[in-house]
Amino acid sequence: MSTLHEQPVLHVGDPEAFGAVKGAIESSFSLGHVAAFLKTLERSGVRVRDFQSVLAKGLLGKATATQYGQLGNSDQGQIRELYLASLERVAPELRQKFFKLYAYY
């Protein structure tokens, strides 16, 4: 029995706000912007896995925290998962360059 796990598609309560926050995350972690985003985190003293601090400091965009706050719990959970999955897909050489951002200490 070799069935692959398929993640269910969840209903989004506020598609406009969800799309805006998702777009901000995808833009920040895009190939052309990820190094600058990580450098901004480094200058701000925020760890990459600390999503709430990244939002609070406006590092994903000034309106992103407000838009995130408009989302329901399920949608916020999906956004946090997207953010965490995105930071894990960063190229190993960039992760090494910004080692302190990724460290758990």
Image: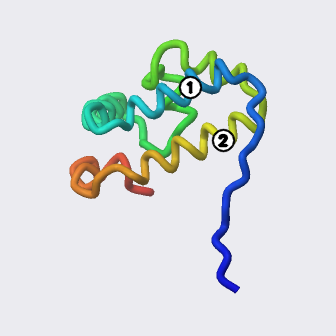
Report helix, strand or loop for mark 1.
Answer: helix
Judged left or right of residue 97, residue 77 is right
On the image, numbered disc 2 is attached to which residue?
Answer: 78
Identify the residue at horizontal 64%, vertical 26% (top origin): 18
Q: CA distance from mark 1 to mark 2?
A: 11 Å
| Apparent side of residue 11 relative to residue 3 in the rendered image (left or right) | right
Q: Quadrant of residue 92?
A: bottom left
Q: Quadrant of the C terminus?
A: bottom left
Q: Which residue is mark 1?
A: 21
Above or below 82: residue 3: below
x and y, in percent, of residue 2 in the image: 65, 82
Which x, y percent locates residue 39?
Answer: 27, 34
Image-based side of 27 in relation to 38, left or right: right
Q: Position of residue 40 (x, y in %)?
A: 31, 29
> Foreground residue, 4 or 91?
4
The residue positioned 72% from the left and 46% from the top of the image is: 9
The residue located at (43%, 53%) in the rendering is: 88
Residue 95 to residue 51: above or below? below
Q: Is residue 19 left or right of residue 32?
A: right
Question: Dot 2: within a 10 Å radius of its alpha carbon, few (fewer than 14), some, or many (20 or more) residues?
Answer: some
Location of the N terminus by quadrant is bottom right
Q: Residues within 10 Å of mark 1 (few under 14, many from 20)?
A: many
Label 2 sits on what residue type? Gln
**Residue 27 occupies quadrant:** top left
The relative height of residue 17 versus residue 49 in the rendered view (above or below) is above
Callout 1, which amino acid? Val
The circle on residue 1 is: none
**Which residue is drawn at the image coordinates 61% and 37% (left, top)?**
79
The way the protein has been coloured in the rendering is: rainbow
Q: Is residue 45 above or below residue 48?
A: above
Q: Secondary structure at mark 2?
A: helix
